[in-house]
Image (tube, rainbow, N blue to C red):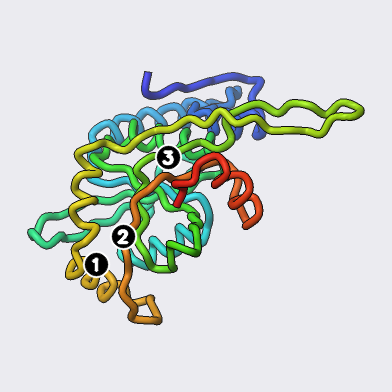
């Protein structure tokens, strides 16, 4: 089922929030009939959303990301969906004079599980052709500079593996078992074609008004490490990530 409802007299605010995190709607049963109104409102909402179809869904994790997206889409409207998550809808016109419908939403909590839950919910609600997620990425300073375009040929989960040791005379050691997800070959073929297109890269640079230094930008293709934690340690990057895969961007 795409939608699940739980009606119970034993629900409280904490349990309803927990159900929402699992993409399940919780309605507290009562004797005054208020639950009936909530149920009817939820059914009407489900019926309305089942008819919706958008082109793009953008998922954000933190306030600053949501704020920047809404600056780019100043005419966004709150969809007022009966849900703890905020959903905003906007439309843009592309170069072919076609209308592109966009829905923007923000996770209630940080982390990969919350991102997966919200993405699944948004796909079921809006049936988008494309899902985009904003996030934080760091790079190897020797090769990648601020403003450059980074394309992941492979996404590698650096947190997969096991933690061992920790006895009286043992140090704790992490043994990696990295899982790699490659990008589609047809998509990578297009990016490789653009890699040496000086004219295209210069146009992208010129269209980005926030770049203070109007320097040339580059397009890099390589492997990207991904995980639930933000890495703020150069030592971790050099001695751990690049130790296990020298091709990381």
Residue 185, located in which quarter of the rendered image?
Answer: top left
Mark 1 and mark 2 in contact (Cβ < 8 Å)?
Answer: yes
Question: Which residue lies under the disc numbered 2?
Answer: 219
Query: Quadrant where the N terminus lies?
Result: top left
Percent across and percent down for residue 21 are: 55, 33
Local packing at callout 1 (Cα closer than 10 Å; few below 14, some 14-19, many 20+) is some
Task: Please tell me whether mark 1 sits on a helix, a strand or a loop.
Answer: helix
Pick the front one: 30 or 137: 137
Local packing at callout 3 (Cα closer than 10 Å; few below 14, some 14-19, many 20+) is many
Nearer-N-terminus badge (3/2): 3
Pick the front one: 40 or 237: 237
Pick the front one: 92 or 210: 210
Residue 155: mark = 3
Task: Report the label total.
Answer: 3
Question: Which residue lies under the disc numbered 1?
Answer: 201
Q: Is residue 93 above or below residue 237?
A: below
Query: How far is the residue under mark 3 from the one under mark 2?
Result: 17 Å
Going by the picture, which residue comes out furthest to the left? 96
């Amino acid at each position: 089922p795409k939608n699940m409802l739980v009606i119970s007299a034993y629900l409280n605010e904490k349990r309803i929030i927990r159900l929402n995190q699992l993409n399940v709607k919780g309605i507290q049963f009562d004797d005054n009939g208020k639950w009936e109104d909530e149920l009817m409102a939820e059914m009407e909402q489900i019926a309305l959303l089942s008819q919706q179809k958008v082109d793009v869904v953008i998922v954000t994790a933190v306030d600053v990301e949501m704020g920047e997206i809404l600056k780019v889409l100043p005419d966004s409207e709150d969809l007022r969906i009966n849900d703890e998550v905020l959903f905003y809808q906007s439309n843009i016109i592309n170069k072919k004079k076609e209308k592109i419908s966009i829905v923007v939403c923000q996770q209630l909590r940080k982390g990969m599980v919350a991102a997966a839950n919200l993405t699944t919910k948004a796909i079921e609600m809006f049936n988008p052709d494309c899902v985009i997620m904003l996030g934080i990425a760091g790079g190897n300073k020797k090769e990648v500079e601020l403003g450059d375009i980074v394309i992941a040929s492979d996404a590698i989960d650096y947190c997969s593996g096991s933690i061992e040791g920790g006895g009286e005379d043992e140090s704790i050691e992490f043994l990696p078992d990295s899982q790699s997800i490659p990008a589609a070959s047809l998509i990578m073929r297009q990016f490789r074609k653009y890699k040496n297109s000086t004219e295209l890269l210069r146009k992208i640079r010129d269209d980005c008004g926030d770049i203070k230094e109007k320097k040339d930008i580059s397009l890099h293709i390589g492997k990207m490490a991904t995980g639930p934690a933000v890495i703020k340690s150069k030592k971790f990057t050099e001695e751990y990530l690049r130790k296990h895969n020298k091709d990381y961007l």
